[in-house]
Image (cartoon, helix red, strand yellow):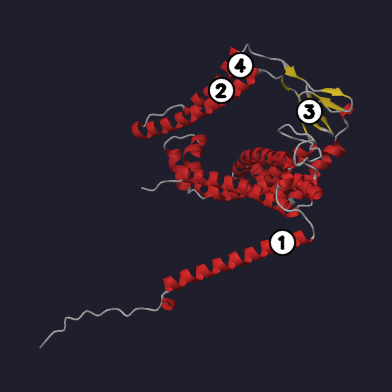
Amino acid sequence: MAISNQISVPEKVPFWLDPKKRAIIYQIAVMAMIGLLGYYLVSNTIFNLKKQHIATGFSFLHKESSFEIGESLISYSAASSYGRALLVGALNTLKVSFIGIIFTIILGTIIGVARLSSNWLVSKLAAIYIEVMQDIPVLLQLFFWYAIFYEGLPPPRQALCPIKGLFLCNRGVAFTVPAPHPAYKYMLLALLGAGVLVFFIRRWAKRRQEKTGEFFPVFKVSTALVLGMPFAVWLAFGAPTKMDVPRLVGFNFKGGMTLSPEFIALLLGLVLYTAAFVAEVVRAGIQSVGKGQREAAMSIGLRPPLVLNLVILPQALRVIIPPLTSQMLNLTKNSSLAVAIGFPDFVSVANTTINQTGQAVEGVALIMAVYLIFSLSTSAFMNWYNKKVKLVER
């Protein structure tokens, strides 16, 4: 009996019946539709703007702004360009967001740990704070703190002075700062250098402990470097002690440093509101770690602070960081509410620019771009940190 040696060749499937090819075609079609829709919207907008004789483009950024800005981290006047005015607003937004995130993380962590305290009173006070702050809209909190300054504090001539060199009035908070001196610039550089050294010392100490089991006093050495290096620079420059004390001149204080009511109200509102959500994130992260981990750490003689620092938090961070990133982004985006209380953030400056130039499309596009950059930068940093601290399974 003859055996057939023919090999069966699979029948060629038409491309519209092949799932992979069909999926590629669908994606190309969707992208083409999105591109056509975008082209239609852009071309239609440009046509209508020209029809209304409204200028387009970003050439207005080089024109004179002709308006003042109350707070600025860089030199600015009404003779500056719109581009510089928008840069001032972006820096103000960055300033309040950066400071707010730092204080929010600190306050939220403290309240989150207090929420789990075995002390009944501490736990209940933390729970009350979380419930109250979460239930009051952040905009109302901004109005509340803003009203505290303008209605609850006296004018500059009757300013409150709880301690020497500190003045509280409806124009803000004025306080004493060191007088300008070259030493402080180098002290800052020394502080940054100490931070870099601490980073490498922590890495070295961790690897050394993993290999040999020997403990290195990282905290004590880090504290000595962070405090000692700037102090040594201060001594090297002759230990300057001159202070710049605020003094009443006319209807306001001159000298020292003054924080405006708008900035303080915005910072307080954002920090107190967002810290309530961060506290719940921290509480949930700590509770996600099994009780057996805590009991095992205490059974080998670790003190409670070391248990929290070496055992609980490293495991809780993988739960804490993703929602914490969302809260940091929320704080940055909520800073746009500063326009309601008159703080010159980017949205406020951009709105003034739009009103004067009439170029709303470009202004709104700049607002979207700036907040997108801030959000993506924050998210990228937190994603990097999340990968760095994640637990590596063996």
Between residue 267 and residue 300, name the one nearer to us. 267
SS at badge 3: strand
The residue drawn where x is 74% and y is 52% is 137
Number of numbered discs: 4
Say above or below: 21 vs 293: below
Q: Which residue is mark 2?
A: 190
Q: Which residue is mark 4?
A: 234
Question: Farthest top residue?
Answer: 238
Mark 2 or mark 1, which is nearer the start of the sequence? 1
Residues at circles 4 and 3 in contact by the CB criterion of under 8 Å: no
For label 1, the crowd category at 10 Å Cα-Cα, with few meaning under 14, some 14 to 19 and many 20 or more, is few
**How much space separates mark 2 and mark 3, taking CA atoms?**
28 Å
Q: Is residue 315 left or right of residue 73?
A: left
Mark 3 or mark 4, which is nearer the start of the sequence? 3
Mark 3 or mark 2, which is nearer the start of the sequence? 3
**How much space separates mark 1 and mark 4, taking CA atoms?**
60 Å
Question: Amino acid type of disc 4?
Answer: Trp
Q: Which residue is mark 3?
A: 174
Q: Which residue is mark 1?
A: 45
Say above or below: 47 vs 11: above
Question: Amino acid type of disc 2?
Answer: Ala
